[in-house]
Amino acid sequence: MPSIDEQVEILMSGAEYGDPQIKENMTRELRERLIESEKTGRPLKVYCGYDPRTSDLHLGHTITMRKLRQFQDFGHDVTFLVGTFTSLIGDPSDKDKARDQLTREQVEENARTYAEQAFKILDRERTRVRFNDEWLSTLDFADIIRLASNFTVQQFLVRENFKKRLDAGEPIYLHEMFYGLMQGYDAVAQETDVQVGGQDQLFNILVAGRKLQEAMGQRPQVAIIMGESLPGTDGEIKMSKSLGNHIPILSEPFDMFGKVMSVPDKALLIYHKLLLGWTPQQLADLKNGLETGVLHPNTEKMRLARTLVSIFHSPEAAEAAQKKWDEVFRSHGGLPTDMPQEVLSSEERVVDILRRLNMVASGGEAKRLMEQKGIRLNELPVTDPQAVITRDMLPAVLQVGKRKFVRLVSPTDGK
């Protein structure tokens, strides 16, 4: 087992608070907890929460999961918390407007496979899975008043996202402030020692969680706030399903392989750092190799894609995905020979075809891809959201990105 100092260095790696003093305090508190744990033999209670706003987790979520896994490997008690109650509201932390509220049925359906997805990173035998409606659904109005009395309205309004909306004259709904209270109560209900989260959770963990624990007579938890977010497949914006730039954990091997291959070269370093946990020296070697031309971006990207598919599927699946990739994009001039075929019986908008065939998640994603010249008809970019395909244009090949193809044919050709 590594020494306490070595454990602290590993567990605090990647943590950032925007304030050196806060980081120093959290490091000191973590060291104290680890020393006590070693003396008493009681493992630390550590958790991270994941709201099932959608049905799948993506690679961006695995950053906090890997931090939980580090705690597991040091023998601590890790809880994967599914926010079945908090997700009814939705975290407003990084949003410029109120989220749509989900129904309990939507949340339950989305949460159904969350634990199985988490076990791609976490140790199944050493992971406690809990759902926060277990304690949040039992609170009555008096409880809410008691919890709310620990905070001022000003504490919430100075948060960056609320402040921007206030300055812009955008509405801030009262129920959005409850989210911080509920997440803070998650820490109280579990009597946690450590909570892990991303930068967008800084207030909820460092302020709400610690303050409520202290008010309830508990020792405030140590906050491990991960400093960097994984950019999406655009290489720029934080990975998010709502933006369509995500790579789901449950992606099919070839789809995951292809999406990693579509990531811009400039994101290679941060993908290796956040998804594979590469050391500063490994990252320096990769950067130097790419800059000097010793390493080729495509080769390194392919190696990354194979590694990730191996992690989330199997080495055999990774090998098959690369073989298919080679066949599609090296042997056949970019067009697969086994693409699916769809009969088009009447004229139809390109956007509607893509949505109907589940080649895009939404009309908004289709329009965004068109702006990036990511949708092609017979290898020519489609940039007009109102573009229509008529029967006299058939047969035709419709392509989304580098991986999705469909051959459109007329009823006669389709026989």
Image (spheres, helix red, strand yellow):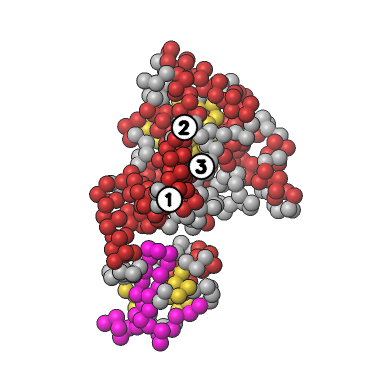
Name the image quarter holding the N terminus.
top left
Q: At 30% from the left edge and 55% from the top edge, which residue is drawn?
A: 322
Q: Name the kind of residue labelled 2 in the image.
A: Tyr
On the image, numbered disc 3 is attached to which residue? 85
Could you tell me if residue 111 is visible in this image?
Answer: no
Q: Name the kind of residue labelled 1 in the image.
A: Gly
**Mark whose residue sits in front, 2 or 1:** 1
The vertical placement of 68 against 157, above or below, is above
On the image, numbered disc 1 is attached to which residue? 293
Q: At 43% from the left edge and 64% from the top edge, which residue is drawn?
A: 401
Image coordinates of residue 236 in percent, x first then y, are 54, 52
Closer to us: 287 or 114: 287
Q: Which residues are magenta?
A: 387-415
Closer to us: 81 or 85: 81
* Mark 2 or 3, nearer chain start: 2
**Left or right side of 388 for 397:** left
Tell me the tag on residue 47.
2
**Mark whose residue sits in front, 1 or 3:** 1
Residues under numbered marks 2 and 3 in contact, where contact means CB atoms less than 8 Å apart: no
State which quadrant residue 283 falls in.
Answer: top left
State which quadrant residue 263 falls in.
Answer: bottom left
Gap between marks 2 and 1 measured at Cα: 42 Å
Tell me the tag on residue 95.
none
Image coordinates of residue 240 in percent, x first then y, are 50, 52
Q: How many marks?
A: 3
Gap between marks 1 and 3 measured at Cα: 51 Å
| Residue 127 on the magenta segment | no
Q: Name the kind of residue labelled 3 in the image.
A: Phe
- Name the element at disc 2: strand
